[in-house]
Image (cartoon, grey):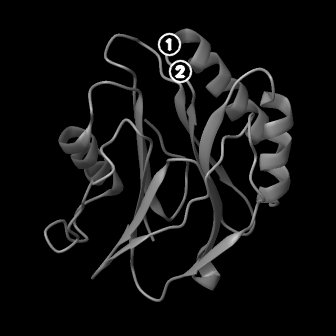
């Protein structure tokens, strides 16, 4: 679970496989001059080894991210190749421009909720094994939105109704709701919620 200092309300929860005490899912959040960088990663497998690989990715991203998402993913791919595999959602939020730039590789589910629901594009592939051609996607927002990203330990049909959960609900409340209602109980799971 975590949060770094920011004016944007966000929160994440990581839940290990029910038979493990550590998780191969992780979330990285970095603050820079343009805005915030978010990454949600799911390492293949479970347990201590997956956890150590997730911690390696977290450390590598923290030390090497410099606003270029494509270059960062390519570097992670080279480090992981022949050692471990992962899928991931990588996003830069530029709040003053009301824009996000993102790349979503693999089966991380990302949905944006407000009056309607929008699924953010994902690209098939596995970092560390088969890296697809990387294209930076853009999403512009004109009003308040709730972005929820989940690894595959959460049922892909997860829903969230912003009318019921109005602005009085925090990103922490939203994460707890998704984890409690949609956790599969057979895998590591991670949920990231951002109120934009």
Residue placed most toward the observer, 136 or 144: 136
Q: Does residue 91 appear in this view?
A: no
Q: Which residue is mark 1?
A: 47
Question: Picture quarter containing residue 153?
Answer: top left
Question: Picture quarter containing residue 123?
Answer: bottom right
Point out the image quarter for the N terminus: top left
For the point 77% across and 57% down, the residue is: 69
Left or right: residue 78 compared with residue 3: right
Q: Position of residue 160 (x, y in %)?
A: 24, 62
Give the structural element (helix, strand or loop) at label 1: helix
Q: Which residue is mark 2?
A: 45
| Location of residue 26 with respect to 120 vertically, above or below | above
Asked if marks 2 and 1 touch (Cβ < 8 Å), the reply is: yes
For the point 73% across and 59% down, the residue is: 32
Left or right: residue 189 compared with residue 56: left
Q: Position of residue 191 (x, y in %)?
A: 40, 44
């Amino acid at each position: 679970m975590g949060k770094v200092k920011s004016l944007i309300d966000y929160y994440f929860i990581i839940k290990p496989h029910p038979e493990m005490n550590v998780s191969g899912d992780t979330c990285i959040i970095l603050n820079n001059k343009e805005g915030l960088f978010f990454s949600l990663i799911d390492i293949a497998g479970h347990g201590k080894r997956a956890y150590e690989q997730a911690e390696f990715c977290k450390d590598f991203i923290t030390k090497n991210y410099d606003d270029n998402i494509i270059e960062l993913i390519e570097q992670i791919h080279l480090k992981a190749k022949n050692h471990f595999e992962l899928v991931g959602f990588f996003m830069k939020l530029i709040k003053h421009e009301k824009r996000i730039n993102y790349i979503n590789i693999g089966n991380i589910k990302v949905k944006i909720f407000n009056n309607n629901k929008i699924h953010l594009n994902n690209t098939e592939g596995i970092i560390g094994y088969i890296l697809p051609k990387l294209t930076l996607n853009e999403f512009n927002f004109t009003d308040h939105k709730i972005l929820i990203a989940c690894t595959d330990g959460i049922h892909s049909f997860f829903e969230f109704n912003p009318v019921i959960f109005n602005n009085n609900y925090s990103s922490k409340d939203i994460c707890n709701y998704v984890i409690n209602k949609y956790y599969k109980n057979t895998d590591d799971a991670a949920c990231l919620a951002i109120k934009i």
